[in-house]
Image: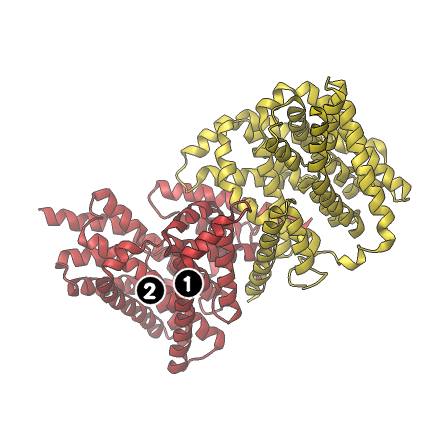
Chain colours: A red, B yellow
Amino acid sequence: MAFTEFLVALVVALVIAKILEELFIRIGLPPVIGDIIAGIIVGKSFLGIFVPEEGSAADSLAWLGVVLLLFYAGLETDYRNFIRGLKNFIVVSMLDISLAFINGFIVGWILGYPLNQSIFLGTILVATSVGLTVKTLLDMGKLDTREGLVILGVAVLDDILGLIILVAALSVIVYGVIDIKDILFIGFMSFLFWLSSIVVIGGLSSRVFRVFSKLHIDNALPILSIVLGLSIAALAGVIGLSPIVGAYAAGLALAKCRRFQIVSEKIKVLIDLLATLFFVASSARIAIESALRLEYIWLYALFISFALIGKTIGNTLGSRIVGLPWRKALIVGIGMWPRAEVALISATMGMAHGVVTPPIYFATVMLIIITSIIVPPIIKLLYAKETT
Amino acid sequence: MAFTEFLVALVVALVIAKILEELFIRIGLPPVIGDIIAGIIVGKSFLGIFVPEEGSAADSLAWLGVVLLLFYAGLETDYRNFIRGLKNFIVVSMLDISLAFINGFIVGWILGYPLNQSIFLGTILVATSVGLTVKTLLDMGKLDTREGLVILGVAVLDDILGLIILVAALSVIVYGVIDIKDILFIGFMSFLFWLSSIVVIGGLSSRVFRVFSKLHIDNALPILSIVLGLSIAALAGVIGLSPIVGAYAAGLALAKCRRFQIVSEKIKVLIDLLATLFFVASSARIAIESALRLEYIWLYALFISFALIGKTIGNTLGSRIVGLPWRKALIVGIGMWPRAEVALISATMGMAHGVVTPPIYFATVMLIIITSIIVPPIIKLLYAKETT
């Protein structure tokens, strides 16, 4: 049966990915790098066992994984500290995101890429993944400082704005528009869908919780929450947006009712299984020898330096404006360097739509690896200098 | 994108299935009937939105659902009471299963079916699903009686032997053998694979638990348990057996270490999501007008009466032999009537291999509905007479 083949591929991908995730956690790198390398091993580059073609079972499962991951990310959002410092966070995040985007765009411009590819370079660089920074600060007992709170708050906004930019960028590519007015219009429409989903579902979230909790089917609350998230994702897909924006909006909206936290715990296993497949699949589709070539070294160097410069300037300036002293502002700036899942999601989505090339994908992977290695020691160094 | 279409089909199937599950629970019927009717609505018969073709994403997800369901069923097995009364249970179960199988086989013989179809009729009738009986006894405070314990114990053996018979029957069809010696040989091989998986993994289960618990990846224990279950399922598939036998064996083996109970709680959400898809998909593939015809009424009547007669004689006699008084033995006999998931799995697997026709599938569905309705009042009646 075809199912046995699918099962074998799935098992091989999962076993290798989970072993490498464990390995990367132990050496202090983000586990998602393990998934990427697992993808290179089982995919097109080497074994050729797990090569998800568009519309295949493995491909659909991988996309389902990223949809559920974003639903989960939305659901996990903690509004309390966020709302408290919102004004400050908006200032920092706006500066952060515009500079990150422009820097990515400039890389494309320097390399002579077409407009839509340059837009995507900017989109990839917008993402931040502060998990590593947060862990570093937590280990040092510095998370509950002003700079720690700014990093946490801006990260929430970065995720939201970053996804809106991704959806807008995708729409631009799907509709093939390059007029700046059209881009703004599509961006605005995506934002509108996103906002109205949040307002409608968010407003009903307590009532939704009560209804779901009363039902008799097994695991009614988590199952129906997932089905609701998938429904909004499907709706976004049907009206021409990316399903992930719907899933994220649904998650964010339900998180308004804090009792939904129990759902995110219940569905975590599902995420840990399927999101892994998404990241494995993203690198499995690429032949590594076509991307890791010396001729691209200029692209890699440019992409990574501009990625770091953009985040540093935007966040340091923004934090200075909202009143942090220079050194603390710089800690925020460097604390926002790390990228992980969201940048990879952007790169993979861009690849699925043909605007992100394998070298850009691998530049993103390298950015993740490099920032993971260098950010913790730099932050420690900045704090060490402070006390002397 | 193809993914949006898949997502829409998935959401429609899940929404309708979960609404109907809720409805059927409320009117006191097994929720799986809701899934079947949802499949008829969204599938080939009516809407045509969710028609999983072989190898498609929806099809693979559905099979993944049944594999995980059996892994879960194995994991949930409670050995303690089972081992205590094992000798008695074996006597009852052997009589039960042989008579159920023979009765199904006779139906095929009366209707003039070829040998492999008749074997499958027997296989479908072997399954028992005592959930409803257990709930009825529990509600009456009669579960902790001798007949209650026999029902629980025999149900475990029925599941195990039923699945071995299913796998043997499937192998017979895949290899196209009809020689009785070959059938016995394949049945023996399936049993051997199943038993050796259990002995090897079961023997290591405490050690496996310790290793999995020590790892750093998120949800290491449930995720790696699932991956282990899928691996044994894939292995079974590769050597030509059905993946479900591997998944069930892996679950049973891990259940030996009681601390794995925590895993079954953690993965239940995954099961509630994907097993639903399996049952929806099973009826979605059928055009109902080709099965629900007056000309098949003879088949339906024969199939259902022999299904009830077989279980009654086998279990009542068996229970009498191990020392239960006649009335209590009859309660066991009738308590074993209900069928649900396992019978449907057998029917669906048979359909996938072309030996179960749509009318037989629907005869199975009707058997499930009828036994669900009549068993609780009959059991209550038998107890009521006892006290007068």
Q: Quadrant of residue B232?
A: top right
Which quarter of the image is occupied by the C terminus of chain B?
top right
Tell me, yes or no, if residue B101 can be seen here: no
Across the whole image, how many numbered discs are drawn on residues? 2
- How far across and how far down the image is residue A354, in percent? 49, 69
Residue A72 horizontal side relative to residue B171, left or right: left
B290 over A354 or under it: above or below: above
User: Circle 1 sits in a helix, a strand or a loop, which is it?
Assistant: helix
Kindly give the residue lying farthest to the front in the view shown.
B388
Q: Which disc number belongs to residue A346? A: 1
Which quarter of the image is occupied by the N terminus of chain B?
bottom right
Residue holding disc 2? A126
Rounded to the nearest angstrom, the CA distance separating label 2 from label 1 is 10 Å
Which residue is nearer to you in this view: A354 or B243?
Answer: B243
Kindly give the residue lying farthest to the top in the view shown.
B323
A49 over B91 or under it: above or below: below
Local packing at callout 1 (Cα closer than 10 Å; few below 14, some 14-19, many 20+) is many
